[in-house]
Image: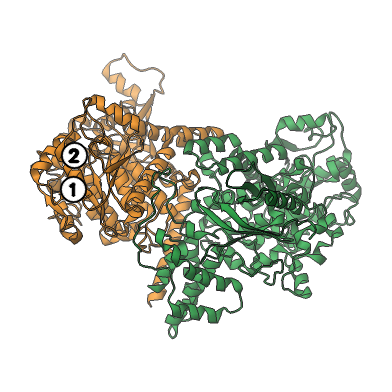
Amino acid sequence: MEHIRLPKVENVKLLDRISHRRRRVGTLYLTATHTIFVESEAGVRNETWVLHSLVCSVDKLAATPSGCPLLIHCKNFQVLHFIISKEQECHDIHLSLQRLSQPESYDELYCFSYKPNVDEKERRQEWDFLDLKADYSRMGLPSSLWKLSPVNQHYKVSDTYPADLFVPESATPPVIVGSSKFRSRGRFPALSYYCKDNHAAICRSSQPLSGFSARCLEDEQMLEAILRSNPCSDFMYVVDTRPKLNAIANRAAGKGYENEDNYSNIKFQFVGIENIHVMRNSQQKMLEVCELRSPSMSDFLEGLESSGWLKHIKAVLDAGIFIAKAVAEEGVSVLIHCSDGWDRTSQVCSVACVLLDPYYRTLRGFMVLIEKDWVSFGHKFSHRCKHVVGDPKEVSPIIDQLLECVWQLMEQFPCAFEFNERFLITIHNHFYSCQFGNFIGNNQRERIELRVHERTHSLWSYLWANRTDYTNPLYRPNHSQTQGLLRASTSPYSFKFWKGLYNRFDHGMHPRQSVEDYLRAIQEETQQLEEHTGEGLHYIREVILILWLITVHSYYKSKEKKKIPPGCFSAFDKSPTVWAPGNNLGLANTPQDYTGGFITGSPCQPKGPDSILLPKSTNQISDASFSNGSDQESGIADLSCRSPLSEDSTRDPDSDEAAYSAA
Amino acid sequence: MEFAEHIKTANVEDVVLRQPLQPPSRGTLCITGHHLLFSDREESDSRQVLLLLRNIDAIEKSVENLTGYSGFFSNASHSERMSGSSGTITMKCKDLRVLQLDIPGMEQCLNIAHSIETLSCLDCVSAMYPFFYRPVDLSLPEQWGLSSPEMHYSQMKELYEKWRLSTVNRDYSVCPSYPPAVIVPKSIDDDTLKKAAKFRQGGRFPVLCYYHKKNGMVIMRSSQPLLGANRKRCKEDELLLQAVIEGSDKGYIIDTRSMQQAQQARMTGGGFESKSFYDRWKRFHRQMERGKALQESLIKLVEACGDESNNMDRWLSKLENSKWLSHVQNALSTAGLLVECVERDGHSVLVHGSEGTDCSLLISTLAQLIMDPCCRTMEGFLGLLEREWIQARHPFQQRCAHSAYSHARLQQESPVFLLLLDCVWQLWRQFPLALGFSEALLLRLATEVYASDYGTFLCNSDQERCALEVKERTHCLFRALLRPTERDYYSNPLYERTELAIWPSVHPQSLQLWKGYFLRWTQQVRHLEEAQEEIRNMVIEWGKLARS
């Protein structure tokens, strides 16, 4: 490709982010789609793959005697610190990567060249996997109170809205069009969620163009219509998710918020979520704290506080709880807006839905939720995630905050969600990776123009196909925790720092043993045992444990181990950007830097019993049952090549389980 | 009963009890010498709350006279006027529970409050509840505790070659805080030990606390050497330490004070092992918070957890300001250093601070958990606690007299043991399959250490326990915890023994607030407990099928 000035550099060092004393030496390759680092030490086969579209920034630091440092920050919070011996090479890599990581047009995006081994018919079916209309009919729509309106069929009323929208039965096209003219970007009030038990609805819009005194009869009628679509209630809430000051400032620009005197029977409320610029800066500050090399507890907590990040997460969750309670407990309909109604509004709608409806806490339900509140209602993914070169002020981690709110809820209610943290992190990765077409562009109209459904693959069916990886073994749909409205706590102490996402690649920080993986294995085995009692049971147990071992391995070691040159991806499922928290798990369970460099002597630790190797027969069984997947093979290969490392008592969750299966 | 003088009102009807996670209930309150008993009026589900008075850390009372004024009238009309009054007692417990009693009648309320205040902090150890606790299903055991230094030594055959059991302290004369038998190098005789003991604060001369089977290296424990301002030395102490590293090129000393603190200690007669006299020992200084500062840290943290302002900045700032998590980080990282010395670097280590009864125990206990799989089973862990904290003497009575709510002036209180439990909890979070016991055990210990039916945490030393016949007249908690029913409840269903060291991560991101303890009485923690129950059920279900 024309942008690659230098396809390969040898003798490159990759420093460990936490402890710079740990470094790996290898070869750096640039391909059309990835940066690949291949460790060249004998006996160790270790590759690090980074998708160009995930690269957020590339910085060349001042040269040092040992070489020229190149720092790569990724949008999935991976940080790679390379040292390239020759300055000229570093320069070339730097320039190439800068260009490769900043596509100038949509056509350069990875999703248009990503061609897994799937035929066209199946690819089309991927896009039929989720159907929003089905979700609306699940809610009981259309009904005598709400109807599907064709008014935006050709995106003429609002070019950032979807074509299919639900509006109150009594809202006539002139009212809708009139209302849309009184709203920023024509984003008139439309239905987001409908609770069929008590007829309360969540509607969304952009801000009204009220200025200091402007009124719009149709807009007032529109709200009246929403109120009337909830026969049990004599008022409705209008929630402006902005801080009051911001909303007032908007009035000077001819925008603003609803005047309670002009709209009959509304209760108006601000909830004070900050704007995209504040959120961007806040996340930046928080990431700087995450990147501190060896912070003290005080440094960390002070940094976390001054970033304000958790405060913002709490604000979003608080707003969601307010709305969920209004709907579930008061049976009152709510209209939510912010300025344009595609950032804070989407967040708050989604959080309220997750709290209200157990369906959105299932795997499929959560996908539907993102598709509904974010993709179809025009969250500007390509701007916010910087898919292509553009205004840096448009970038903001709004969607990250949704995932984090859900994660915080999962931490509070371990049995309430069908999916796990891995699911959220994988979705996060693909908001940014541009590997799938789902989040390309800023709204439905743009995606149709880009012919995304004809040219790319869908993340949702990929996730569904791999759903066993993303299932929470503790999910109990009938548990008291999970019934109806989630009564979440927003006491400050309920919020935790999400190291699983923001320090995702710092393997040393994460728990070394996974309860979830263990439970999943038990769960599978229990199911199998229930099915097959009696004969062959022993054999089945063994096979299951082996299968499980292999899957665990492929989570942790799922870097593709294919031969270079890459760029050709034959396997659909395990692509390089897939879940891969531990490509150097060998380093995970080793001492941390407790000594501050006091003890530098070479380890003289006697070798313990080597429980890492699987029995040979086990290897054979698994090879026989899994000859098709390259990853499974690499899992085994890694098992056997890990033994040289056992001298520093390395140990990882999977090897614990190796002992477990041998028992 | 001698408690009667403190109980003016033993029974009150029509009391309302408010407690966390439950609706208020109305019933009868009863005060006994050791307990507060509340029985619900509804006979159907007759809920009872039995609370050890010892568990109450602080009370607040407010009385309200509904008739408007009280006071200077004759006795007859006095009680009539009182009948319209009522009072509220808020009890803040050492297990961090906060209970509230609404009591009709001002006088009754004041009487009850007075009884609670007096009886909850009686100083007399032999009047405490463990001496009266006689459950039907437990008989006083022949042997109190799980093991003894003698039994421990006899089970460790690896020790026989180079180490011996010394009974130099059989009458507690050499070191009042040591048990009668200790393990020391074979080549060192009792006279040398006596002299070395004189050179160590409180007579706590270096003794063996852990032998690492993989490489024969050991952890020793002691108090600070008494160098003083004029740098005294003691040949016998040097000899003793020399004998420890016989056959090895060097040893490490981990001093749990900063270099500066250790130097300052010389002014008051203490000090540290100087390079010139202990030339084969390399010293690390790791400043660890202890004493009052640690107690204040706990008080601040508990205060922060109870803050209802709902403000994120304020919470994070208070959490940081309490420094509790910094202490957790520091303890785990110092223990990590100790393990690195023994396990990776292959050398023996001596741990001490000043007295050698707080941080030294904390560090050596954590190090053993990290290194030794035998300490990670439930028996192993309780045995470890018994060796390090009961036998080697942590002054529990002084350290745990009060917890975070008390208004009493701080004396010797310090939550070192609680800090240990928090660190163990962090280990369990990071290695959820590696420990044989569950969070519930840690919570139980955290409660029992402040107020208990058992005698295990009474007194400050083995000597005091003998004097009061604790071992004859009370039950042992550790033994009770190992009864089959209790054991099932406290075991970790996911436990899979691993032989290797479990190196904890000490990054701030890896350490968390121990919600199970500090936010124990909130709905949120209930959800987490329910999840643990689900995990247990899954494993049981699987176990049943796998066995069938």
The answer to whether dots 2 and 1 both sit on one chain is yes
The amino acid on which the numbered mark 1 sits, given as a three-letter code, is Ala
**Which image quarter holds the C terminus of chain A?**
bottom left
**Which image quarter holds the N terminus of chain A?**
bottom right
Q: Is residue A93 above or below residue A130?
A: above
Dot 1: element: helix
The orange one among the chains is B
Q: Is residue B538 visible?
A: no
Q: Quadrant of residue A252?
A: top right
Residue tagged 2? B204
Residue A137: % across, % down: 74, 62
Give the chain letter at badge 1. B
**First in residue order: circle 2 vs circle 1:** 2
Question: In this structure image, what is the colour of chain A?
Answer: green
Query: Label 1 crowding class (10 Å Cα cut-off): few <14, some 14-19, many 20+?
Result: some
Residue tagged 1? B243
Of the pair A246 and B208, the residue shown nearer to us: B208
